[in-house]
Each structure stands twice: as C-alpha cells, then as structure tokens.
C-alpha cells in the first residue's frame, strides 16, 4: 500500500545531503607519519592512532611506525593508545613537517572505550546509560560469532531460538514473546548495524561479519534511536573502510567437523574513496543423530559477505555505502523429546497411551543421548541482506546524519513439530518473504556551551507475506493425537491423512516517529537530560486459510471431525495507534571517578495484530481478538559508574519496569491457530540489580565480570492459558504472582586474559592464556508457570591459549564448554499438547585451533 512512495522517501533526504556535500570545499592533506615507542624506547606494535572526533585511525606496524591518511582540516587532535600504557593526546595546528616521535608512559590503566549510544562519540563511563561494550577482538578470540554465544558474555541478555524465525531476543527478560513467534508484533529490543535497524529476529542467528564492537544498551531508548525500544538495543558497529591498506584472514578447525574462515581487506581506491570487503563462512557437522535418516542433524552451514565504500568529498562530509548478504543452509534446529507429563485429559488421550496404541516408542528416554527418529525433513533456509547509504555532514557544532536502507529476508523451513518418528503433524512449514525500507534523519551536537542533544525523524515500511503459503498437514497417525472421544469414526481410513491447511497472509505496516533528547549542563557537575518521542504505527493484515486433502466425503459427521482439527478461515484487519512517550535523566558527576544517574521513562511497544490465525467460538472466527493492545511501560533506574583506580571500573544499576497490557503468546492445543495466538496480560513487573567490573591488575593481566539479579512477575493475568500438565481441565487460570518465562534470577559472566612477552623460534610476540565463564540459575520455559517445564540452572567454561607475533600472526587453541556440561537452552510443548515436551539442547564440548594473519602496509 505504500510502495508508490518508497523511491522518493528513500532518496529525497540523501539528495539534500548529497547537494550539501558537493558544495563544501574539497581538499586533500598529506598523510601523517610517525613512530610509537615506550618511554624507554621500545617500539610498540599495534598502538592505535586516531583522529579525535572521527572514525579515522591506524595501528602502528611491527617497527612501531604508522601512516595515517585523512581528509580532515587542521587543527586536529591525535589520540594514541596502547594496552598497558597511558594514552596521549597530541594537537596538530598544521601538517607536521617531519615524522612524529610519540612516546607512551607505561601504565596499567584501562583503555578508553568510545561508544555511540547517544548518537555521538563519548567515553563509556561518562554516559548516563547502563550499557556493556564487547569488542570485536574478544568476539573473534572467544568464538562468539553470533548473538547466542554473545549472551554468555552479557548476562542481562537472553536469547531463545527453536529456529531463526522462532527467536526471542530479550534484555532484562523483556523484549519479545517467549516461545513460538507471531509476526504480528514488534520486538522490544532494537537491533542496529551501522545505524540501520534490522526488523526480523532471524538476524540474531547469523554470523557476525567484521564487527568492531557491540554496545548492549539496557532500558528504553526511544528518545535516541529511530525504532522504539522498550527494553534496550544492540548497537553494532562494523569495521569501516580505511585509507591505509590492511587485510586479515583467519581459519579455525575443530572437532565435529567445525571449519570457519573469515577475513577482510581494505584500502584506498583514490584519495577520497576507500573500500572494504569482508566475509565469513562456518560449517559444522550435526550434534544430534537421526535414526530415520541415519545421519547427524543440527549442522552449521553459514556464509556472509559485506562490502563498503567510504567517500570523503570534503573534510566535513562522509558517505558510507554498504551492502551485505548472509545465507544459512543448516540441516537443523531439530528438538529432542525431553519429558512427558500427565495432563488432565482422559487416560486414552495421554501421550504414553497414544504411542503405545500406535506400537511406537521413543528412541531414548534421555535427551542428552542426542538421538531422534524424526521422519520429516528439518530445513532452515535463512537468507538476509540489504543495501544502505549513510551520510554524515558536519553542520554547526554537530553532525547531521541521514541513513537510508532496504533489507530483505527469505525464510524456507521444514519442521517435524510432533518431535517423533510418527506421522502425526507431518508438515509444518511457513515460508515467508520480508522487505523493509527505513529512513532516519537526525542531528546530534552542541547547541551552546551548556546545551547539546539529539533530534531526529524515523520511518519504517515493512511488507511480510507468505511465499506462497504456509502449510500445516496431518499424517497417518494424527487421528490418534487429536482424538477427543472414543467414537470409531476417528479410525476411518484416510480421514486425516494428508489433510491440512494452506494459509496465504500478508502484513503491511508503517511506523513513523519524531524523537529528541537534550543534555542540559546545569552546573559543572549536574546535568538534566529530558527526552520525548511521538510515534505512529499502522498495520494491515490479509489472512486467508483453506483446507485441502484428507478423506473426500459428504458424511457430515466425518466432515465435522476434520474441521475440528483444521478449518478454513479468512479475515482482514487494520489497526493504528499513536503514542507519546518520554524520559528524564539526572546525571551527577560527584568527582572525576564517580558518575551517578537516575532515569524515569515512559515507553510503549507498538500495537500488534494476530497473524497465526484466530480461535473460533461456535463456528465463528473471533475477529475481535485480531487487535493486540500496545504495551505501556513505566521504567525507572538509578546507577553509579565509578573508576576506583586508573586500572579499574565498577558500575552498579538498579532497575524497575512496570508494564500494562503485556503482549504475550497464548499457547493452545487448537492446531487451527498454529499452536498459539497473541493476547495481553493485564500487568507485569521486572526489577533487578546489575553489577559489572573491569580491572587491569598488571600490564599483562586483565579481568572482567558481570552479575545480574532479575525478578520478573505477572502482577495480574487473570485469564491466562493453563500450563501443559493442566491441559484438559479448565481452559484458563489466574497466574497472577507467577514468574515470567525466560528469566533467571541470577546470571553472571567472568573473563580474564594473561599475556607474557616472549620469543618463539626467533619471532617476537606474546604468549597468552584466556578464558571466560557464564552461569545462570533455573528459569521457567512456559508462558504460564509449570511444575515441569523449567530449565535447570547451568554453568559453562571456555578456554583458549596461544601465541601472537609482532608481525600479525596468531596461533591458538580453544575449547568451549570445557566441562562438557549438559544443558537445555529452552523447552517447548509438542503440537496439540498431548503431554510430551521437547528441548533445544546446548552444544556439548567443542575444541579446535585458529590461525590468523593480519597484514598492514607499512610507511
């Protein structure tokens, strides 16, 4: 409905800034060269030399030298940093006439971490927002190549995925519905890569491509980011093109057939144009054996490419054009039956009785035997990519930014949702196509000596449709699973075999917003930061489900049995809503080492619409349930960021969120609504305490830790679905006071690295030993609290050790889950709620080695 406007909406703001860029006087400057040494004269390899306030930087080479090409006008300030040494700022009023000699004093202080959480470059400890920064180097060394592995470094993050589409990404236990995904609601966690919003949760299963750093921002951020975020955001920055040529290539090899290769190359194409090409590829054998196919499943088969062009028409304008494509073709995401509970249905409807009547038994009673016998193909074709253009122009005392992007997602699945070797639910497939167009224009800068801020507009158009239809189909054994009485009609040959539904649906949506946040420096120590946001959301859905197959009959009794399993349904719906939200933060700088802050905010999660089918009542489709009310959130937090010494940081935050009309998924035994539909819980609350610390005990030893306590409760949910063990009794229950799913009360991470200067085979470098650990307490894996569907707590440990040479070569061995801990990622009920439930298993112990070479052109 919006397509005739897409072209001009995409390019109009770019055209304005492009005209501005080409009116600014263009000039080039001679490269800055020099050498970085220690105070004693030792050449320092890998020191960072950066032009302050820009993204232009280089690393010193193995002889300590550097060459920094740039387009900046003088004066400029160089910032030079190296681990274990005190950083140095050097102001250049004009181009240096000779190579610079820079000497750094040894110091155990932590490196300054620069973030863009408030849409401008700031040191992380000075930002009055709780956030965690994970550098790209740590991600690569720790084999944390996707969000599922990243969560082990950031305990406030939760990710649950039974396949890329059915993925929940939460921060502090809030964000998306737990369990199966309904595409009719928006995520509460924003996911941004180089300023571009990614709308589909499937992105969290993709491999990271050439990431520079990830900022995990906790709490509502709607006054700073284009898309509203009720629980936080991932702000991912990739490595940009550079005017100094360099290249990196890395290969890892491990057990279970693990092979991963990634690399990048960058350099100038002209004095004003630089390029970067990055890639990643991952393959691994399966971790679960399928007796039916006689091969292992749950493989990895990922490929990702990213290209960028950086154009500097002047020293005041940067234009970054990026394109990426990722492709996943695993034989995977199979789940293993983890247990069977007795429901409140009649004895003949219990799972164990059903499979006994069908002369079937599970291949193993222990899920950690990792054996299945699924007879329907597991397939998860996941393709995602897009193109973006970002223009940054210095205007006045700040930066005007325009970000335009188009992205797509193709989803081609096949699932065995009965989790057995029986032909019950023989097909469960929801192939989909998603296109999104986004445009953001914002200004961030200083308005005067006491007032700075961010103001922007954002628009997002989405088009999600089945490709060409979603399929749910019964097999020859389905009659026994859905049998509601003991009438012999259920055993009519062919009654349900091949009987199913084909659903054609389309969701078109638009989200627009105006947002802003000010930073008023009341005194030298006290700042007030008010923010406001206006948002408009519109969604249209066209849903048409038809039945096919099964026994062709005119017997009304048999037809009634078929329609009790699957029925035809069609509806159209349109919903819209506008909201105001905002926040105010007080920030107080008690001293050079202590920054305190407190925030009160109101936020919302946009209006939703049911896209998985609607329940029926007396043969009537309940269209009144199509609309899902927006969430309304009141949030407050208080925190303190401290720097006890030059070599340590210690931060503490208390947070509390109160949500009305909490959007949740109602799981149901009714197969006609694809096992679940969306509803609103009256009120929930989440509160907690977070602590994180970093310390460098010595130039060669560093340590980080994080601890999170989180308590999430339904304050009021009087008409909730019953848990699995109560199916067959009352259809709904009051679960007020029960705990929210997916939230561990305790979670924590710990990491360290020790290095030592050494010479190996006459090659200078550093030996290192590093490790990280993660733990979480048990959590509910059922939308309604259950006695059985609870994941026990677990702890994981990862280790690595190797040698990094001064010439860019690194060799190290690694192992993940060193103790070979058996653990569940999540539990989910089988289709139809017969009493069995399945598990997404965590990976067992893996180990291998990595070879890496980093090359940089020397002056």
Image: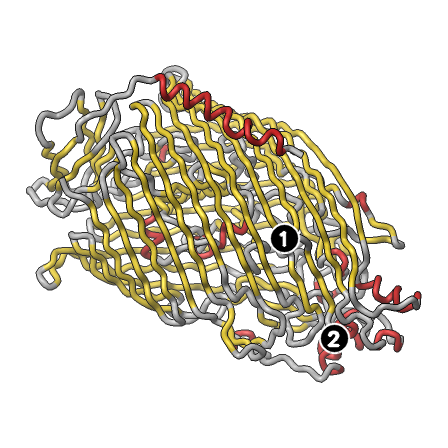
Q: Tell me, yes or no, whether the two marked residues, 1 and 2, touch with CB atoms within 8 Å.
A: no
Picture coordinates of residue 256 (x, y %)? 40, 71
Relative depth, front residue between 154 and 563: 563
Q: Residues within 10 Å of mark 1 (few under 14, many from 20)?
A: many
Relative depth, front residue between 751 and 763: 763
Is residue 667 visible in the rendered structure shown here? yes
**Snapshot colouring:** secondary structure
The residue to which callout 2 is attached is 477
Give the vertical position of 838 relative to 272 (above or below). Answer: below
- Local SS, label 1: loop
Query: Mark 1, mark 2: which one is toward the viewer?
Result: 2
C-alpha distance separating marks 1 and 2: 26 Å
Q: Residue at x 73, y 57 (%)?
A: 502
- Local SS, label 2: loop
How many numbered markers are drawn? 2
Picture coordinates of residue 323 (x, y %)? 43, 42
Q: Quadrant of the C terminus?
A: top left
Q: Going by the image, does 413 lie left or right of 84?
A: right
Q: Residues within 10 Å of mark 2 (few under 14, many from 20)?
A: many
Give the vertical position of 178 relative to 215 (above or below). Answer: below
Is residue 735 visible in the rendered structure shown here? no
Picture coordinates of residue 629 (x, y %)? 71, 39
Q: Seen from this angle, which residue lies furthest left? A: 41
Give the vertical position of 196 relative to 666 (above or below). Answer: above
Q: Which mark is residue 248?
A: none
The residue to which callout 1 is attached is 181
Q: Residue at x 35, y 28 (%)?
A: 318
Q: Residue at x 8, y 28 (%)?
A: 98
Q: Going by the image, does 48 lie left or right of 162?
A: left
Q: Residue at x 52, y 66 (%)?
A: 331
Picture coordinates of residue 112 (x, y %)? 29, 38
């Amino acid at each position: 409905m919006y397509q005739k406007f897409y072209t001009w909406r995409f390019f109009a703001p770019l055209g304005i800034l492009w005209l501005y860029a080409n009116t600014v006087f263009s000039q080039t400057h001679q490269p800055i060269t020099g050498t970085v040494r220690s105070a004693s004269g030792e050449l320092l390899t890998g020191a960072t030399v950066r032009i302050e306030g820009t993204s232009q930087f280089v690393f010193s080479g193995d002889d300590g030298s550097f060459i920094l090409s740039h387009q900046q006008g003088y004066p400029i300030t160089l910032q030079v940093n190296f681990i274990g040494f005190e950083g140095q700022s050097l102001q250049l009023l004009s181009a240096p006439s000779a190579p610079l000699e820079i000497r750094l004093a040894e110091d155990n202080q932590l490196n300054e971490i620069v973030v863009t959480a408030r849409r401008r470059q700031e040191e992380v400890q000075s930002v009055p927002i709780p956030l965690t920064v994970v550098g790209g180097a740590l991600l690569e060394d720790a084999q944390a190549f996707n969000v599922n592995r990243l969560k082990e470094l950031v305990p406030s993050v939760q990710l649950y995925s039974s396949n890329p589409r059915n993925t929940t990404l939460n921060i502090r236990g809030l964000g998306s519905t737990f369990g199966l995904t309904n595409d009719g609601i928006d995520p509460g966690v924003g996911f941004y890569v180089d300023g571009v919003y990614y709308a589909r949760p499937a992105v969290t299963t993709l491999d990271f491509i050439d990431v520079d750093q990830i900022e995990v921002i906790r709490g509502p951020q709607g006054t700073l980011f284009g898309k509203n975020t009720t629980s936080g955001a991932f702000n991912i920055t990739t490595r940009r093109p550079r005017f100094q040529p360099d290249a990196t290539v890395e290969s890892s090899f491990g057990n279970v057939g693990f092979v991963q290769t990634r690399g990048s190359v960058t350099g100038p194409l002209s004095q004003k144009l630089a390029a970067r090409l990055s890639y990643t590829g991952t393959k691994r054998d399966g971790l679960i054996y399928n007796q039916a196919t006689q091969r292992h499943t749950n493989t990895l088969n990922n490929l990702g490419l990213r290209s960028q062009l950086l154009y500097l028409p002047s020293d005041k304008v940067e234009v970054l054009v990026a394109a990426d494509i990722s492709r996943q073709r695993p034989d995977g995401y199979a789940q293993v039956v983890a247990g069977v509970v007795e429901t409140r249905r009649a004895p003949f409807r219990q799972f164990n009785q059903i499979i006994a009547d069908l002369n079937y038994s599970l291949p193993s009673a222990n899920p950690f035997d990792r054996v299945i016998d699924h007879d329907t193909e597991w397939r998860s074709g996941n393709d995602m990519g897009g193109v973006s253009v970002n223009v940054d122009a210095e205007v006045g005392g700040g930066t005007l930014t325009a970000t335009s992007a188009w992205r797509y997602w193709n989803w081609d699945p096949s699932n065995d949702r009965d989790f057995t070797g029986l032909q019950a639910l023989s097909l469960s497939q929801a192939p989909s196509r998603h296109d999104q167009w986004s445009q953001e224009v914002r200004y961030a800068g200083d308005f005067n000596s006491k007032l700075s801020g961010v103001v922007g507009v954002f628009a997002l158009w989405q088009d999600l449709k089945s490709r060409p239809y979603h399929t749910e189909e019964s097999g020859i054994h389905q009659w026994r699973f859905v049998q509601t009485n003991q009438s012999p009609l259920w055993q009519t040959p062919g009654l349900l075999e091949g009987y199913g539904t084909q659903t054609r649906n389309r969701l078109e949506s638009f989200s627009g917003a105006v947002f802003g946040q000010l930073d008023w420096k009341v005194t030298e120590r006290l700042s007030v930061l008010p923010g406001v946001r206006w948002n408009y959301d519109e969604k249209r859905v066209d849903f048409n489900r038809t039945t096919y197959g099964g026994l062709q009959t005119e017997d009304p009794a048999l037809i009634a049995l078929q329609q009790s399993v699957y029925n035809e349904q069609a509806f159209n719906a349109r919903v819209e809503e506008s909201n105001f939200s905002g926040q105010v933060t007080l920030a107080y700088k008690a001293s050079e080492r202590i920054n305190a802050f407190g925030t009160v905010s109101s936020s919302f999660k946009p209006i939703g619409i049911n896209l998985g089918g609607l329940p029926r009542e007396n043969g009537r489709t309940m269209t009144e349930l199509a609309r899902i009310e927006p969430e309304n959130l009141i949030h407050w937090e208080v925190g303190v960021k401290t720097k006890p010494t030059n070599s340590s940081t210690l931060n503490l935050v208390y947070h509390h969120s109160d949500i009305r009309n909490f959007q949740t998924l109602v799981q149901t035994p009714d197969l006609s609504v694809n096992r679940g539909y969306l509803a609103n819980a009256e009120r929930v609350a989440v509160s907690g305490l977070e602590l994180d610390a970093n310390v460098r005990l010595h130039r060669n030893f560093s340590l980080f830790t994080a601890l999170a306590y989180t308590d999430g409760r339904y304050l009021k949910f009087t008409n909730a679905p019953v848990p699995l063990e109560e199916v067959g009794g009352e259809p709904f229950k009051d679960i007020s006071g029960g705990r929210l799913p997916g939230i561990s009360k305790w979670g924590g991470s710990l990491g360290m690295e020790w290095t030592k200067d050494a010479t190996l085979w006459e090659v200078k470098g550093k030996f290192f030993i590093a490790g990280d650990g993660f733990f979480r307490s048990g959590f509910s894996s059922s939308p309604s609290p259950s006695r059985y569907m609870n994941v026990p707590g677990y702890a994981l440990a990862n280790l690595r050790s190797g040698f990094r040479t001064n010439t860019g070569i690194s060799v190290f061995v690694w192992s993940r889950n060193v103790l070979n801990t058996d653990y569940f990622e999540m539990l989910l009920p089988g289709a139809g709620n017969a009493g069995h439930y399945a598990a997404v298993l965590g990976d067992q112990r893996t180990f291998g080695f990595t070879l890496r070479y980093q090359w940089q052109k020397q002056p």
